[in-house]
Image: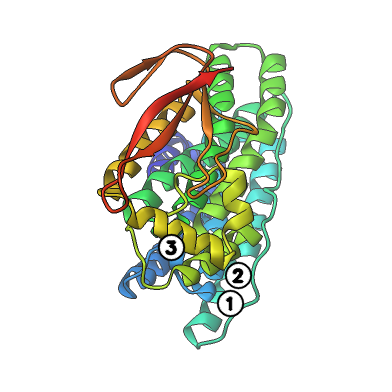
């Protein structure tokens, strides 16, 4: 628990100077440790069932959502204390705010323990809803602690993304997971810029402004973290993906069969049996579906890098309903170079059963 170690390294040796520091130190470290143990135990229960978080039973997803929020809130309290201790003491305002963080985390911890008891007895708790993180802006005298509470949410979700991916995401939910990752990355870039500004700033007034700018980004990270461990919070698209998987029956590529499809078309067709059958026929016509996925992965990476974008209104009308891509900056795809303004697409070539996908230029924007 790196955060707790940081707290011991900062506040711990000085705790004798202010009994309030020792009190909060005991609460935060104990609370964070217990939260981590509980969350990891639920994750282990999912692994024991031979599953991963994205296909776990709903009752465990609900429990994990609550336990994850508990863990985040205790981490926030821990880093707030660590950043606020000065000369072995806390200001009255910093003490009140850290005490409030601990109280909030304790209240949610009690709910998580009760929920864990229900789940262990075979009861199904009601589905949780996505919640917002209680915000803490602070004044110039407590701004260091306020920033620390925001940064720890970014760190937690960033690490959790890799943790979930290392455990594996079911192929039929891979597209949704990428949606969650994209939502994180869209805010992460801005947050990292604000972080560089924070590290360079020595003005309390500037730091207060940076915290205010970072607050909505942190709320986005908190939402992503909840969706990451509890994918039903994605709403109808999650249910549609599950229904789509049932329509595919025993057909299993080992990856999301909608990977080539224009995102808008995928959302419109994912629960349509005829569309699913057409998509199955398309994949069966390919000689090597894995190579097609590799090409799409290359394109997706270029999209994440800002080199390509899906060109609106240029979707092919037959399965797999693949889009044209517009080049935003010079890019190389499948050893072919494309210039700004070029359009390209993945087009099938050959006879059924032996078709291959090729990257071809299709025009210019």
Tell me if I can see residue 15 in this picture: yes
Is 271 left or right of 335, judged from the image as shown? right
Horizontal side of residue 35 vs 194, given as left or right:
left
Work out whether residue 145 or residue 175 is closer to the camera in this orientation and state it. Answer: 175
Here the colouring is rainbow
Horizontal side, residue 259 vs residue 298: left or right: right
Q: Quadrant of residue 80?
A: top right
Report the Cα–Cα distance between label 2 and label 3.
23 Å
Task: Tell me the tag on residue 114.
Answer: 1
Label 1–label 2 contact, CB within 8 A: yes
Name the residue carrying label 3: 53
Question: Is residue 331 positioned above or below 53 on the image?
Answer: above
Which residue has dot 2 on it?
110
Q: Quadrant of the C terminus?
A: top right
Q: Earlier in the sequence, mark 2 or mark 3?
A: 3
Q: CA distance from mark 3 to mark 1?
A: 21 Å
Mark 1: secondary structure: helix
Answer whether labels 3 and 1 touch (C-beta < 8 Å).
no
What residue is drawn where x is 48% and y is 48%? 320
Res. 87 visible in picture: no
Which callout, 3 or 1, points at the residue further toward the start of the chain? 3
Q: Measured from the top left, where is residue 347 in percent x and y?
A: 41, 36
Q: Secondary structure at mark 3?
A: helix
Q: Quadrant of residue 168?
A: bottom left
Question: Observer-nearest residue: 120 or 105?
Answer: 120
Q: Residue 176: x and y, percent?
A: 52, 51
Residue 41 appears at what percent x and percent y? 39, 68
């Amino acid at each position: 628990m790196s955060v707790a170690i940081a707290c011991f390294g900062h506040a711990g040796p000085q705790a004798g100077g202010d009994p309030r520091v020792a009190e909060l130190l005991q609460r935060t470290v104990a609370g964070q440790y217990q939260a981590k143990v509980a969350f990891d135990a639920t994750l282990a229960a999912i692994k024991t069932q031979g599953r991963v978080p994205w296909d776990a039973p709903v009752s465990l997803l609900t429990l994990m959502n609550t336990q994850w929020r508990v863990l985040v809130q205790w981490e926030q309290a821990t880093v707030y204390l660590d950043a606020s201790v000065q000369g072995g003491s806390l200001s009255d305002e910093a003490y009140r705010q850290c005490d409030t963080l601990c109280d909030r985390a304790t209240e949610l911890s009690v709910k998580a323990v009760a929920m864990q008891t229900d789940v262990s007895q075979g009861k199904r708790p009601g589905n949780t809803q996505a919640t917002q993180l209680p915000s803490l802006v602070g004044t110039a005298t407590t701004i260091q602690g306020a920033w620390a509470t925001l940064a720890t949410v970014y760190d937690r979700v960033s690490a959790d993304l890799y943790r979930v991916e290392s455990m594996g995401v079911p192929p039929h939910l891979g597209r949704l997971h990428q949606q969650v990752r994209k939502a994180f990355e869209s805010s992460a870039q801005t947050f990292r810029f604000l972080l560089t500004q924070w590290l360079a700033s020595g003005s309390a007034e500037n730091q207060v402004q940076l915290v205010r700018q970072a607050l909505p980004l942190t709320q986005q990270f908190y939402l992503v973290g909840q969706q990451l461990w509890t994918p039903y919070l994605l709403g109808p698209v999650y249910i549609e993906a599950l229904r789509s998987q049932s329509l595919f029956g025993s057909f299993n590529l080992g990856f999301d069969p909608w990977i080539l499809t224009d995102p808008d078309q995928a959302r419109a067709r994912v629960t349509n049996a005829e569309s699913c059958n057409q998509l199955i026929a398309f994949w069966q016509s390919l000689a090597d579906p894995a190579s097609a996925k590799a090409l799409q992965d290359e394109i997706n990476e270029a999209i994440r890098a800002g080199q390509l974008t899906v060109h609106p209104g240029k979707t092919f009308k037959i399965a797999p309903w693949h889009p044209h891509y517009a080049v935003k900056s010079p890019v190389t795809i499948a050893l072919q170079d494309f210039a700004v303004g070029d359009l390209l697409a993945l087009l099938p070539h050959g006879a059924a059963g032996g078709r291959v996908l090729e990257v071809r230029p299709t025009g210019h924007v």
